Structures are given as structure tokens and as C-alpha cells.
Image (cartoon, helix red, strand yellow):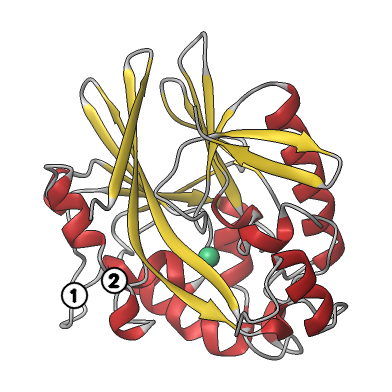
Amino acid sequence: MSRIISKTIGDKTITILNDGGTEFGFDLFPGKEEQELKHILGDASKTGLSTRFNVCLIEIENEKILVDAGVGNAFGPVAGFLPEALEEAGITPAQIDKLVISHLHPDHICGSWDDEGKPIFNNAEVIMSNTEYNFWTNANNFISVGEPLTSWLPVAQEFLSIYSKQVNTISPKGDISSGVSFHSLPGHTPGHCGVMVDSGTQQFLFTSDLIVIEDIQLQIPRAEFAFDVDKQLASTMRVECLDMLATDQILFSGGHIHGPKICNVVATDKGYQLETE
Ligand SMILES: [Zn+2]
């Protein structure tokens, strides 16, 4: 089974690397009953909400940019296959020039260090938004947040410590490389960012955690989602971004989309759906 899919737009090649997948409980949507969610899934026998973990590789003539670093050991044997996916793409971790972090949740950073706490992407400049960096490095932000953020904080701190010599923060709308830039999508975390690739004639957006449960959130994008720090803002961004992707016909993939897949977002009378060319 292949873990990768690639598409070339202009002088840039985009590859989605699948890192594995898992299943979450129905309690991820606080305002929704299990029965309603099963109805949206169209399958009453479902035992949970399935998700995937994906990483995005952007290759430009002289540069290899990795967006996020996978889950590592954080989810046990069902995930942590980024090394296999990179090998399938013919890339070694040492070849990555820029490691772009969409946000500092464990499932996007834990694949970036080895069992001895050494950075795997040892030659990469690590780029994240200054909003995200400032959120996780100010203890005052965590005084009354509760779980899961409380237990995710030490993981983010470990990452920032391991990569301290490599981290460079930029604006949530800043340029990462020529034709590659952050696309600000706050709400999931304050500094959560997607990454836009613009070839001049075609655009692609990797939205990271705008959508975590594809089977539910494409149909009811406004529903509150447990892992979003600012649930209202996150749902507003979800609707605005899906609308933009569909209207402007921007190619799409995300950190938790089933696949690996690079596709189009199409508006329907029941929300949105994904269509692969
Ligand atoms: Zn995630």
C-alpha cells in the first residue's frame, strides 16, 4: 500500500505523506449526540470517528519543505509511519531544508525527534508562526485551560527545547519560500496556520487541522469541535476557508484527510465534499 501521493503545479511538487490513522470517540463534538453523528456518517454501526495523520512535502528546485512532522510514537502502532512514507518519496530527513510547523499539537511534532531526544530533521530551519510560538511559551495562557491543553503543553515545550537552535518565527501570513506562504487559520490554536503553494496559475492549500474529522466536519463545518482552543473562531475559519477553496478552485489537502489525497472542495446542499480529479 502506497503512503504517498504527488502532484506537480508549476515548478513545485507537492507530496502528501500518510503517517497512519486512528479512531476518536463521539465526544469530540460536545454539542452533538452520538446518534446524530452516526446519522451524518451514514452508518449506525460505527464505533467511533476515524481520522488520518498526514504530512505535506513541498519540493522546489533547490529546496525541500516539510509541513509538520507526524505523530511519532504518540498514538502507538497505528501511526508513526512518516519515515516509511519519506523513504517511499526518496527523501531522507537530513535533506529537509525547512520544517514548517502548522501548530504545536503532539500529532504534528512528535515525529520530529528520536528516542534519545535528538532532532531528526537536523539540517532544517524550523518555521512556525510567531502567534503560535508566543501562545505556547507564555505560561499565563495555560493557567485555566484544562485538558487536553494542559498535558499537551510539556510536549510542545520539549519540541521547542530540542529544536531551540533551529526555530525561526514569522508572521501567520508570512512567506516561507518563493510561492509558499503561511495562510492564517486561527481558532484550532491561536497561531494555527495552513500553507499555501502558488504556482502562478494554480494554488494548493494544506489546511492542517481546519478539518480533523472529515466525515463530519465537511457536512457540518460550524459544529463545535473539542480540540479547537477557540471553538467559535475555528468554526468561522472552517466555513470561510472551505468556501474559499470551493469558490476559487484551490487544490486542497489537510493534516487529517483520508487518503493520501490531493483534491478539490465542492459545495453541495449538505455542506462540502471532496472530489479527486
Ligand atoms: Zn492534528
Residue at screen point 41% across, 56% down: 54
Residue 26 visible (yes or no) = yes
Residue at screen point 85% across, 78% down: 32
Q: CA distance from mark 2 to mark 1?
A: 12 Å
Q: Which amino acid type corresponds to the residue marked 1 in the rendered image?
A: Asp
Residue 121 visible (yes or no) = no
For marks 2 and 1, give the one nearer the viewer: 2
Q: Which amino acid type corresponds to the residue marked 2 in the rendered image?
A: Gly
Give the SS element for disc 1.
loop
Q: Is residue 133 above or below residue 72?
A: above
As drawn, the label of residue 267 is none
Nearest the camera: 128 or 51? 51
Is 167 left or right of 206, judged from the image as shown?
A: left
Residue at screen point 60% across, 26% down: 250
Q: Is residue 180 above or below residue 95?
A: above
Q: Quadrant of the N terminus?
A: bottom left
Nearest the camera: 97 or 148? 148
Q: Mark 2 sits on what residue?
A: 80
| Residue 40 spot, x, y in % from top left | 77, 65
| Residue 221 spot, x, y in % from top left | 79, 55
Give the SS element for disc 2.
loop
Is 232 left or right of 153, judged from the image as shown?
A: right
Numbered disc total: 2
| Residue 123 spot, x, y in % from top left | 17, 49
